[in-house]
Each structure stands twice: as structure tokens, then as C-alpha cells.
Amino acid sequence: MAKSTLLICFLGLFSAFAAAADHSPLQDFCVAQSGSSVLVNGFACKDPKTVQADDFSFSGLHLPGNTSNKVGSRVTPVFVTQLPGLNTLGISLARVDYAPWGINPPHTHPRATEILVVLEGTLEVGFITSNPDNRLISKVLQKGDVFVFPQGLIHFQRNTGTGNAIAIAALGSQNPGVITVANAVFGSTPDVSMDILAKAFQVDKSVVAQFQSNF
């Protein structure tokens, strides 16, 4: 009886994991069809007979991004919207350029784990674990070093060198999503109530108003 109960529990747990996993592709590829009015969890497929090599190709990652902005960084994404052939494949990547002391501000990817490799320069990187510990795990990376940011956790990068830095990030989703913490909290539309933010951050409402004005 005990063995039967254990087997049933095991099968139930296995079924739960199987249901939570991404489905395997049912065809060779599903190139995203631009302009489609069909709403699916992803993008509708282009007719395979019309697919060309350009659907699986993207050019431009050799070009430096313009870092002349308030944070001193620029992300050049290669997600499914830039590379239609990524549709249903569960991967994407991005180039990140950093001016000296530029940052890629604290943000999360709700649908993807990220692995980052430094091509040029020196980067301080880190992520913060979830409640209740909120532990900062950080490291300074040199050229050729790799670091991984677990899915959904807040993370950041900062160029600690006097020259420009470059990194390539690979992500485990065709459309990983990006939630930049400061922009989301202080730049939402409409604004989050000043009372809520003042209490959450334990600051005066005038400080909240100043933050919101910046976004």
C-alpha cells in the first residue's frame, strides 16, 4: 500500500513538472509572420514555403550602441521582433554597450534567465535574491568572463573602467521582457499613488515627487 501511494505521488509530481515545461516544437521552425492579426502566445507562423535565409539572420551587432544618455549604456536587442526565425525556439540575445562608469540599471527579465559574457572592458555585475533575504550577489568581471542572472531576479551591470565596455547577453526566451525597476515604479502610467510610494520607500512625498518628475 505504501509503495502504491509513493508511486502515485511520484507520478503526480512528474506530471506537474511536465505540465510546467515548455512544449517541444512540432515542426522545424515557425518564422514569425509580421502584421498578423492572429493573437497567440507568441507569433503566428509564416508559410514555410515563403521562408528565406534572411528570416534567420540579423546584422548590426558589430555596431556600437549610442551611450549618450542618462545611464550611459545602450542595449541592442535581437529578440523575435528583430529576428523572426527565433519564434518558438526559446532563445534570444542582446549587445550591451557601456560608457565609462555607465550602468545597465537594475531590471528583471520576467520570462528568461540571462547569461552574459564580457567582450571588452571591466564590469561590476550583480543580482539580488528574493524576499526575505534580499542578498546581493555581485562580482567584477574582466574580458572573457561569464556571469548568469537567474530568471526574474533584479540585476544590473556597471562599467568600472575608464574606457568603453561591451557585453553580449544570451537569454532563455524569444521575448524575455524587461522591467526596469526605477522606470516601472516612478514612471508608470498613470502614476502610482504618492502615498503608496512614500510609505513603501519610507521617504517624504516631496522626494517621491522629485523621483517621478525624472521619469
Image (tube, helix red, strand yellow):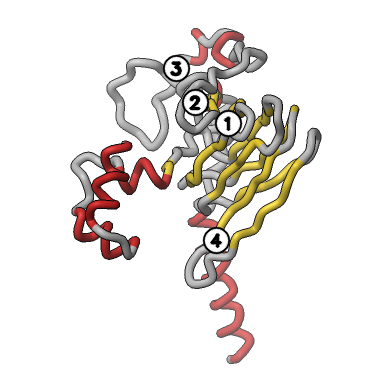
- Looking at the rendered structure, the secondary structure element under dot 4 is helix
Name the residue nearer the viewer: 95 or 183: 183
Residue 17: numbered disc: 4
Residue 98 screen position, x and y as percent: 61, 29
- What is the C-alpha distance between the residues marked 2 and 3? 13 Å
Q: Evaluate if marks 3 and 4 touch, with contact meaning CB atoms under 8 Å apart.
A: no
119 displayed left or right of 105: right
- Looking at the rendered structure, the secondary structure element under dot 3 is loop
Image-quadrant location for residue 47: top left
Query: Which residue is at 24% across, 47% downward?
Result: 209
Residue 92: numbered disc: 1
User: Is residue 138 positioned above or below 41 on the image?
Assistant: below
- What is the C-alpha distance between the residues marked 2 and 1? 7 Å
Q: Name which of mark 2 and mark 1 comes first in the sequence.
A: 2
Q: How many numbered marks have been drawn onto this rendered protein structure?
A: 4
Q: Evaluate if marks 2 and 1 touch, with contact meaning CB atoms under 8 Å apart.
A: yes
Mark 2 surroundings within 10 Å by alpha-carbon count, few (fewer than 14), some (14 through 19), many (20 or more): many
Q: Nearer the viewer, mark 1 or mark 4?
A: 1
Residue 80: numbered disc: 2
Q: Name which of mark 2 and mark 4 comes first in the sequence.
A: 4
Name the residue nearer the viewer: 95 or 136: 136
Q: Evaluate if marks 2 and 3 touch, with contact meaning CB atoms under 8 Å apart.
A: no
From where the camera sits, is residue 115 visible? yes
Q: Nearer the viewer, mark 1 or mark 3?
A: 1
- What is the C-alpha distance between the residues marked 1 and 3? 19 Å
**Which residue has dot 3 on it?**
46
Q: Amino acid at mark 3?
A: Lys
Query: Which residue is at 50% across, 46% downward?
Result: 106
